[in-house]
Amino acid sequence: MSLQVLEITEKFSMMAASHSIATDYGKLDCLTAIFTSFFSRNQPLSFWKALFPVFNNVFDLHGATLMARENDRFLKQVAFHLLRLAVFRNESVKKRAVIGLQILVRVWFFTCSGLPHML
């Protein structure tokens, strides 16, 4: 079930990017709620492996909006859960969690500095 929700989330993110809602945090709040829900629950290993490419894609498309100051609660929760996953037993999940943290830091840096976003 989680994998299906993840797939729908990715499709919504891609559709939102092609419309004006891509820069409206209020309208993207459903993405933050879904990711927060994913991160706060135990998931099978296959899910964690599938999550990180979608997470990267969402931040490629909506990073500036999701990293906005008014969204700091979401960012703190995601950072907490990524740190939690960075000590996961599976080496692949650990690596992906660290990459997720790098994505957050990189997007935050480019968002705050005004530099062009390059991943």
Image (cartoon, grey):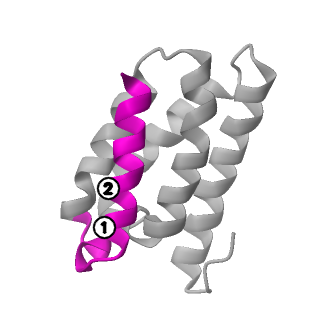
Snapshot quadrant of residue 76: top left
Measuring 64% from the left and 31% from the top, which residue is drawn there? 49
Q: Residues within 10 Å of mark 1 (few under 14, many from 20)?
A: some
* Residue 23 part of the magenta segment: yes
Q: Given the current orientation, which residue lies at the most extreme bottom position?
A: 115
Give the residue type that dot 1 points to.
Ala
Snapshot quadrant of residue 62: bottom left
Q: Residues within 10 Å of mark 2 (few under 14, many from 20)?
A: some
Q: How far apart are marks 1 and 2 (CA)?
A: 6 Å
Q: Which SS class for mark 2? A: helix
Give the residue type that dot 2 points to.
Phe
Measuring 53% from the left and 41% from the top, which residue is drawn there? 79
Q: Which mark is residue 16?
A: 1
Snapshot quadrant of residue 88: top right
Task: Please name whichever residue, 63 or 52, is drawn nearer the observer in this view of the structure.
Answer: 52
* Residue 116 part of the magenta segment: no
The count of marks equals 2
Q: Residue 12 carries which label?
A: 2
Instruction: Measuring from the top left, give residue 21's x and y in whole percent.
Output: 24, 73
**Figure quadrant of the N terminus:** top left
In this rendering, the answer to whether 85 lies above or below 77 is above
Instruction: Measuring from the top left, give residue 85's x and y in whole percent.
Output: 62, 26
Task: Please name whichever residue, 90 or 15, is drawn nearer the observer in this view of the structure.
Answer: 15
What are the residue bounds of the magenta stretch?
1-25
Measuring 27% from the left and 59% from the top, which residue is drawn there? 28
Q: In this view, does 41 lie to the left or right of 101?
A: left
